Amino acid sequence: MPSLSDQPLIHHLQQFEFKTLTEVPDSHAWPVVNDHPHGDDAVPVIDLACPDAARLIGQACEEWGAFQITGHGVPVDLLDRLEAQTRRLFSLPTGQKLKAARSPGGVTGYGIANISAFFSKLFWSEGFTIVGSPHDEARKLWPDDSAEFCGAIEEYTSWMKPLGCRLMLLMLASLGLSEGEIDWTVPSSETTHEAAAPVIQLNSYPACPDPDRAMGLAEHTDSSLFTVLYQGSVRGLQLLHGNHPTRRARWVTVPPLPGALVVNVGDLSHILSNGRFQSVTHRAIVNRTQTRISVAYFYGPPAHFKISPIEKLIGPQQGPAYRAVTWPEYLTLKRRLYNQALASIRLPTEGEEESRTNTSETITAAYTRRHGEAKV
Ligand SMILES: C=C1C[C@]23C[C@@]1(O)CC[C@H]2[C@@]12CCC[C@@](C)(C(=O)O1)[C@H]2[C@@H]3C(=O)O
Ligand SMILES: O=C(O)CCC(=O)C(=O)O
Ligand SMILES: [Fe+2]
C-alpha cells in the first residue's frame, strides 16, 4: 500500500498529461475493471414536485441508496455554466493547476481523491475540492480572471443549500420524522437552515485510450449525509446494487438524464437511520472518446453536530447500531480506514454482545478447568 502522503499523487499529476497519452501506462493499468455482472435494473427517477416524493425517496434510500431527481428547480443554463467552468479549469496546463495543488494532509485544491492512497494503481482522473468560498483557490489558478468561475460555483452553491435542506427533510419525513426532531434542520433564519460549510468536488475523467484497463474513481461510499451529483451528459457513474445474501451485487450505470441530478446516500445517513438507509457504493469508469466531468456537492451537518442513530428508529430489541460521530471525526476515519470506516464505529447488537459474553464465559470456564481460577 502506498504512503498516505499526498506527495506521490502530486508527482503523478506532474508526470502525466492525460491527453498526450496514447496508451495506459503501467502506473494506471488496473487488472480487471468490469469485475461484477452488470444489471439492467434502473435507479429510480423522482420528480420533487410530485406529492408522493417523500415516500418514493424513502423507498429509493432503502433499496438503492441513490436516486435521480427532476423538478429540483436548478436552472439548466446554470448547470451548463458550471460544466463549462469545470472544463475550463481542467483544460489549464498542468503547471498552472499545480499552483493550486492540495497540500499534504490538506482538503482544498487540485489533486486526486484521498482514497487513491489505498490502491497500488492510480486513477484516470483529476479533482479540485472547494470548501466554502472558491475565491482563494481560484485566484491561484487565474490571478486576474477568476470571476466567472467563482460566479458559477457561488450561484450553484446558493441553489444547493436549500435543495440540500429540502432533500434532508423529505428523507426525514419518509422515516416518519419531522424537522424539529433533528435540531440543525430547524430554520435558523426565515429562509435558510444551518448546515456545514459547503464542500464541492469537481471531477474530470479524461478520454482514455484503453478504458477497460483504467479506473476513473474506485468504488467507495461518500461520508456525507448525501451527495448531490451533476454528471453532465457523459456516462460513467456506476452504483453497486442488490447486496442481497442470495444474489451477487451488480454494477448499474446511472444514465445521464438532461437536467437531472443524482443523489447518493452517504454514510452519515446510514448511521442516522440506524442502517435503514443504505450508503451506496459507487465508482466512475472512463471512456475512449469523451472527457467526462462531474460536480459533487457533499451535504453534511454542522461540524459540531454529533450524528447518531435516531432513537425513534431503534427497535425495542435492537439498540443503536453505530456510535455517535461528528462529520469531521468521520472524515478523519474515512481517510484512515477507507471502506472500513463505517464498520469501525459499529456497536455490537444485543445478540452479538450476548454471544461475546457467552464466548468469554466459555473461555474463562475452559481456562479455569485447565489452570484453576482466572486472574482477570
Ligand atoms: C468532504 C469531503 C468528502 C470527501 C473528502 C472531502 O473532504 C472532499 C473530497 C471527498 C471525496 C471525493 C471522492 C471520494 C471520497 C471518498 C474521497 O476520497 O474524497 C470523498 C470524501 C468522502 O466522502 O469521505
Ligand atoms: O464522477 C462521478 O460520477 C462520481 C464522483 C464521486 O463519486 C465523488 O466525487 O465522490
Ligand atoms: Fe462519491
Image: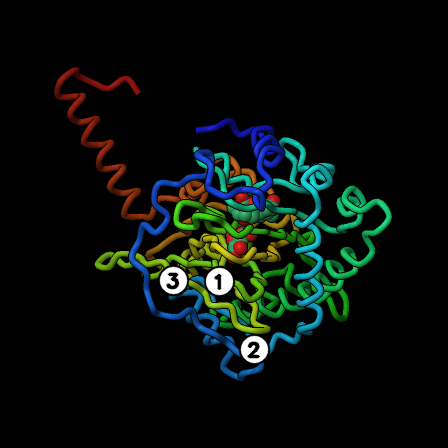
- Residue depicted at x 52% and y 72%: 257
- Residue 238, by quadrant, is bottom left
Q: CA distance from mark 3 to mark 2?
A: 23 Å
| Label 3 or label 1, whichever comes before in sequence order | 1
SS at badge 3: strand
Q: Residue furthest top?
A: 371
Q: Residue furthest left?
A: 369
Q: Residue furthest bottom?
A: 51
Q: Position of residue 352 (x, y in %)?
A: 28, 44
Q: CA distance from mark 1 to mark 2?
A: 23 Å
Residue 252 — which label? 3
In this view, 298 is above or below 7: below
Can you say which quadrant of the picture contains the C terminus? top left
Q: Position of residue 231 (x, y in %)?
A: 56, 62
- Residue 96, by quadrant, is top right
Amino acid, disc 3: Val
Amino acid, disc 2: Leu
Amino acid, disc 1: Arg
Q: Position of residue 250 (x, y in %)?
A: 32, 59
Position of residue 254 in the picture relative to residue 167 (left or right): left
Q: Can see residue 247?
A: yes
Circle 2 packing at 10 Å, graded few (<14), some (14-19), many (20+), is many
Residue at mark 1: 235
Can you say which quadrant of the picture contains the N terminus? top left
